[in-house]
Amino acid sequence: MNSSNNDSFVDNDPEDVVKIFAKIQKFSNPLFCFVGLIGSLLALTVFLSKSQRSTSCCLYLAARSVSDIGFLVSLIIVWITDVWDASIFNSQGTCQLTIFLSYICGFLSVWFVVIVTAENYIRICHPFSVKRYCTARVSKLVISVFLLLALAVYNFPLWTLEISQGRCTGKRRYDELFQMFIHVDTILTLVLPALLITFLMVAITFSLFRSYHRLRRLKGKRLEKKKSRKTNHSKVTTLLFTVSLVFLALNLPSHVIRTIMTLSRYIMHRSQFTTTEMVLQKLFYTLYYLSYAINIFIYLLCGTRFRKDFYKMYIECFAKSCKGKKLMKTDSSCAQLLNKHSTKVDLASNGTVV
């Protein structure tokens, strides 16, 4: 890329267009990361509250919030290093742990969405299996298995990276191995999850479509009973369906453009990319970071029980604390007035002119 400092919008040089999108990404992505970090922390506390932690889907979403927090922390460390030339990332230990955290948390975030989509599929397409598979005990087992799998597959940054000339880089003798792990990661975090989520979402959509047409044929009390039975069920499925759909829409483009550019580099032996590819890469990665920032808003918008618990835990507590501070100020003012009044009375009783 041209290193010229001319970033003017008047200049129609394609490389300047890339630099404009790079600047937008440079300042918008950390904002999304910080918003996502706060949102994930709030969502985690709600999902682990007494009223929700006994539900399997809430445990999956809580585990996803934890992995999102870890991934965002690694991104923020890298961003601080890039912007302020800090040595926090390019130091022994931090280098390996940051990359390790980004890989393992990225893997878990993706697969927890796949699991949530699979649970939604069971709830909609196989409702009689809900009591067997959609339980807190099963969810804890699944979370543990995926955590162990992630640790087994993604420990390679801990022993393939080193600090060379003040920078975090891979050890030369592990170059081919590192590339192999990158390809494996592409399959595990892009190809398989995308295929599974797409398949499950299509199956869910067809099942909902058939269910809608069956409901239309029902009449009178039978229809009312069916609606009342589906009310609580539909609240859960709506949240899970929205989580899967938004994740697919915002994450898939960045993975696709990354795969295209990787294949063109290693298969077609291209050393440079077109302006369109570079712009799309910046744009799609901005959408990718945005997906972490809007999770809390999806939960609030589509999760009825989440919204109620969030209101009780944060909005009501904040309102009570503000009210308490106002009462303390009022009591303090009243006490001052009473003290002043009592002083005047004492002076008057002693014959002192006030």
Image (tube, rainbow, N blue to C red):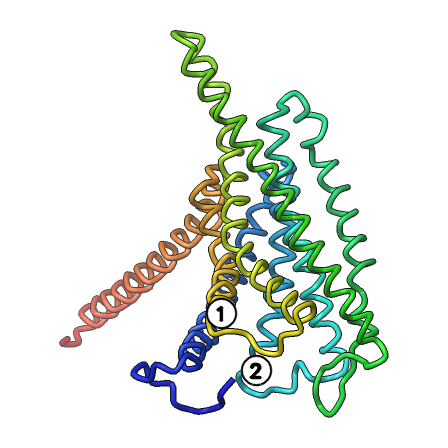
Q: Is residue 137 left or right of residue 313?
A: right
Q: Residue at x 46, y 18 (%)?
A: 228
Q: Which residue is mark 2?
A: 82
- The amino acid type, in three-letter code, at marker 1 is Lys
Q: Nearer the viewer, residue 44 or 290?
A: 290
Q: Earlier in the sequence, mark 1 or mark 2?
A: 2
Quadrant of the rendered structure where residue 204 is? top right
Q: Is residue 273 left or right of residue 15?
A: right
Q: Nearer the viewer, residue 64 or 275?
A: 275
Q: Is residue 303 left or right of residue 151?
A: left
Q: Position of residue 28 (x, y in %)?
A: 44, 70
Q: Residue at x 53, y 45 (%)?
A: 243
Residue 54 higher or lower than 89, as above or below: above
Q: Position of residue 222 (x, y in %)?
A: 45, 8
Q: Position of residue 354 (x, y in %)?
A: 15, 75
- The amino acid type, in three-letter code, at marker 2 is Asp
> Comparing marks 1 and 2, which lies closer to the viewer?
1
Task: For the residues labelled 1 and 2, say whether their Cβ atoms are less than 8 Å apart.
Answer: no
Quadrant of the rendered structure where residue 215 is? top left
Residue 114 higher or lower than 17, as above or below: above
Q: Which mark is residue 282?
A: 1
Quadrant of the rendered structure where residue 100 is? bottom right
Secondary element under disc 1, as helix, strand or loop, is helix
Residue that sits furthest to the left in the current view: 353
Q: Residue at x 79, y 47 (%)?
A: 145
